[in-house]
Amino acid sequence: MPKTYIFILPKTYISKLPLTTSFGYWQLFIFYTSYIPFFHFGLNDGVYLLNGGKSYDELNKSSLKSQLFLGTIIEGIISLVICFFATISVMGPDRKFVIYQTLINFLLFCSSNYLGYVFQAVNQTKIFSISIIINKFLFIIQLLVMIICNYQDYKGMIMGYNVAQFISLLFCVIKSKEIILSPLLNLKITLKEMYSTISVGAKLMLANIASMLILGVARLLIDKEWGIEQFSKISFSITLINFFLMFINQFSMVLFPALRRTTTKSQKRYYFLFDTLLTIILPSLFLLYFPLKMLLDFWLPEYEISIYYFGFLLPLCISNGKMQLLNNTYLKVLRLESDLLKINVFTVILSLIFSMVSIFYFNSMSTILAGLVIATWIRNFISEVRLKKYFGFKLVGYVQEVLLISMYIVVIGEFSNQIGFFIYFIGYCIYLIFNKNQIGFVLSNLKMMKERVDDES
């Protein structure tokens, strides 16, 4: 769950708890909330898949409203049950507070996410994007007020986050008034509709949960074995990675409904174009590490080790970036959710094995990071093999990418910031020279697409 305010939050924790501990409880809240979609059992994902490519007028609004209302009731019951067991448990008050607030967020998020998926499916991504902007903007305003008033408590930040989520939900409700004001179907029909939706969406939901668990199992084991402070440090590094991936994810929201309306021939052509484009552009993200490291070392000296971890996790931006924007999107468009689920579950098992060996045998955080990078690259490789086999493309270019990333890892580990930047810049330029034909292909196709759009307008 990437956040644009990650550079401000750690700086604000100067409360009764140590800085990394306070930030750790915030990250624990974010970590828990990232898995709450599991408890809608695939309802939201099913709505997304079944309605992808339709227009807003084509939607069965009564069905959508009825499923939303019944789903919210079921989610409320689940929340009460979890709340009861949390209350009678022996965990500390801070962790209980985090769980209670997570359950509140669960109800707010699932409803707004349901409506957001409807907007995405019918290619009204602007509305969904505005709801996210409202959420983040309101939270940042609350955060700044807390800083000015010297309110130094992570609990206030978590509650402020939920207030922003509530207002974001209200915006989605207002924008979907045609759905909200539609008549409800009777319970029998609603249950039948919901069963059909969940049947379609369950695999995609499980695939998404498995995707998050690739990094999540490592964080869970770190929290269990080394405590909240180590969890805080690795979580900050992963949050920085998600900050980069957030921008890539915005494109995937637009790409899915657009591809659903195109022909198989166009889907094939666009896949090759986007694959080539990402292969060229994504390695340039490594250049941003060097100036960003200097900034973070100055702004957050307490998180020096987290910034170090961030450097070694940055290759995730290439593997997960291609996976989010291209492979995930195409596997959903082609209705290959079963393949996506299998690939993600296999990668979770790999990640779990790597993490357990790293913690219990090597007792090394660096080995955990290496395992995470390897696991995500294997996932991306398997996905590309599946899609390129489907479209009849050959798998090429992987050796160059691996060499470039290997050079980056050596550079950040062995050289100073300035020298490292210069060496990697030279290496990336050589990489571009080797791929000059692919660059020409991308530029010519983008020019053709622009001319076509200009002609249509």
Image (cartoon, helix red, strand yellow):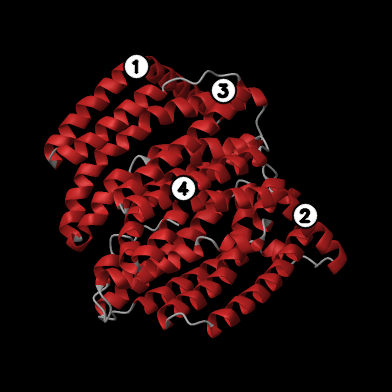
Q: Which residue is mark 4?
A: 353
Looking at the image, residue 317 sits to the left or right of residue 345; the answer is left
Pick the residue in front: 115 or 43: 43
Q: Which residue is mark 2?
A: 60
Q: Position of residue 138 (x, y in %)?
A: 41, 69
Q: Vertically, is 373 above or below 278?
A: below
> Which amino acid, mark 3?
Arg
Q: Residue at x 52, y 18 (%)?
A: 394
Report the Cα–Cα distance between label 1 and label 3.
19 Å
Few, some or many C-alpha atoms within 10 Å of disc 4 (few <14, some 14-19, many ≥20)? Answer: some
Report the Cα–Cα distance between label 3 and label 2.
33 Å
Few, some or many C-alpha atoms within 10 Å of disc 3 (few <14, some 14-19, many ≥20)? Answer: few
Q: Which residue is mark 3?
A: 269
Q: Which residue is mark 1?
A: 436
> Which amino acid, mark 4?
Ile
Q: Secondary structure at mark 3?
A: helix
> Which amino acid, mark 1?
Lys
* On-image quarter of the N terminus: bottom left
Q: Secondary structure at mark 1?
A: helix
